[in-house]
Amino acid sequence: MNVALDFTGDMISFSYFDGNDVVTEILRNTIGFRTPDLFRNDGAILALMHVTKDMIEFTIGSTVSDAILAVPLYCSYAERERIQKAAAACGVNIKRMIKGTWASMFHLFQTLSQDKKKITVCNVHSDYAEFLISDVDGDVLEALGSTVIKYGRDSTPEDRDKLKQIIQSEFKALYSDLQLPHGEATHEVYVSFDESADPVRGLFLETLISCFGTEPVIYEKDAAKGAFYHLMKMESFERDPGRKVFSVDCSMEGISVSSGVVDNLQEVFRRNTPLPAQRMVDLMVSSDNVICFYAGNYRNREYDEPIGTCRIPDAYRGQAIHVKITLNDNGIVEYSVLDASRQIIYPRQFLK
C-alpha cells in the first residue's frame, strides 16, 4: 500500500488513499523524533522508521510497501540517503522525497486560483522555520528560492528581538538575490504553525506583516497530503508527456556543475524543471581539473554534499570541454564529457 509520510514537523503525519479521497492522520506516540541529530544518526532513523511503519500498519490494517516522504528543507543529500537506507531495511520503498515547504506548497496549490502570481509560504516549527518563494502560472509551479531559519525553543525577550532581525534580514537577502520587490499586488503570503510553535507564533506574524505590509493568510500545513498530490502530478505527467506539469524530485533538486571549487558553481538546470531535460555546459579545464556535481539549492547559497566527481585527463588542461547533463524520465541525472571537437572523453554515466 502507498502512504505519504511527513517528517517535517514535531508530529509525524501520514496520508493514504481511501477510494478517491486522501486521508491524513497524525501519529502522536513515535519515538526519538525531533532530536537534534535525528537525520545524522543511523540508529535513530532506523528505529523511527520501524516504529512509524508498525503504527501505520496497525492503524490502517494494511502492509506499507511504498511511501512518498516529506523531509525538512534543511535535510542534506547525505541525510536523505540515510533515510532511504533505513526505509529499505524496514521493507519500505521510498518512491519520492519532497523537501518540507514544497510538500505543503503542493497541498496549497490545489486550492489556489490558477492565475499568475508569486507566493511566499512559511512553515513555522518549534525550533526552525522554512520559507519558500514560488511562481504560479496556470498549472506550472516553480520554486524561485528558499531558506531555513533555526532558533532555540526557549527564547528570552532579547533572543526574540534578535530572531525578528534575523527573519527580516533573511527575507531581504533572499528577495535581493531573486531581484524581487516586496508588496506586489499579485504576491500572496501564507503561513502555517506546528502545534509546538505557539511561543513564536506572535513574533512571526508581527515580522511577516512588517516585511510585506500585509497580514499573511494562515493555512493548515499538510505536507503528507501534499506529497500525495505531488505523486499524482508526477504520474499524470508520465502518462501524458504533453501535459504542462512542473515537478520536483528532491533527491535531485537541480544540478550545479563546478570546476572543482564551490565559488565557481555554474547553474545547469533550474531547481525544478520538466522531465526530460538536457543542457550542454562549456567549461575551461584549469589547473584543478576535477568537475564536481552537486545536488542542492543553488539559488539561495546552500550547497549539499557533492554527488559525483569527474577528473579530466591532464592532457586537456587549458582546453575547452563540453559537459552534457541529462535529466531522464526517472529523475536520474546522466552526464557525458566531450572535447572541443565533440569527441567523447567520458561516455554517459549516472549520478545517484
Image (tube, rainbow, N blue to C red):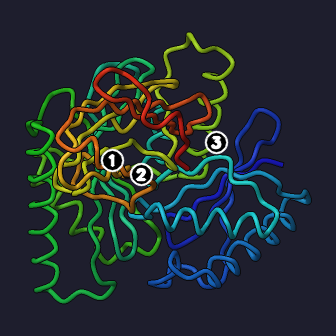
Residue 101 numbered mark, or none: 2
In three-dimensional space, the C-alpha distance between marks 2 and 1, rounded to whole angstroms, equals 7 Å
Badge 3 crowding class, 10 Å Cα cut-off, few under 14, some 14 to 19, many 20 or more, is many
Position of residue 278 in the picture relative to residue 67 (left or right): left
Mark 2: which amino acid? Thr
Are there few (<14), some (14-19), or many (20+) residues within 10 Å of tag 2?
many
Q: Pick whichever of labels 3 and 1 is earlier in the sequence.
A: 1
Give residue 228's mark.
Answer: 3
Q: Quadrant of residue 329?
A: top right
In this picture, residue 22 sits left or right of residue 250: right
Q: Residue at x 40, y 20 (%)?
A: 114
User: Distance between the Cα atoms at labels 3 and 2?
Assistant: 14 Å
Q: Nearer the viewer, residue 317 or 110?
A: 317
Instruction: Single out the mark in the foreground, 2 or 1.
Output: 2
- Does dot 1 land on a helix, a strand or a loop? strand
Figure quadrant of residue 57:
bottom right
Q: Nearer the viewer, residue 66 or 127?
A: 66
The kind of residue tagged 1 is Val
Q: Which residue is mark 1?
A: 121
Query: Mark 3 vs mark 2: which is more N-terminal?
Result: 2
Could you tell me residue 256's position as x and y percent?
A: 32, 44
Name the N-terminal-most of marks 2 and 1: 2
Q: x and y percent of residue 193 in the render?
A: 40, 62
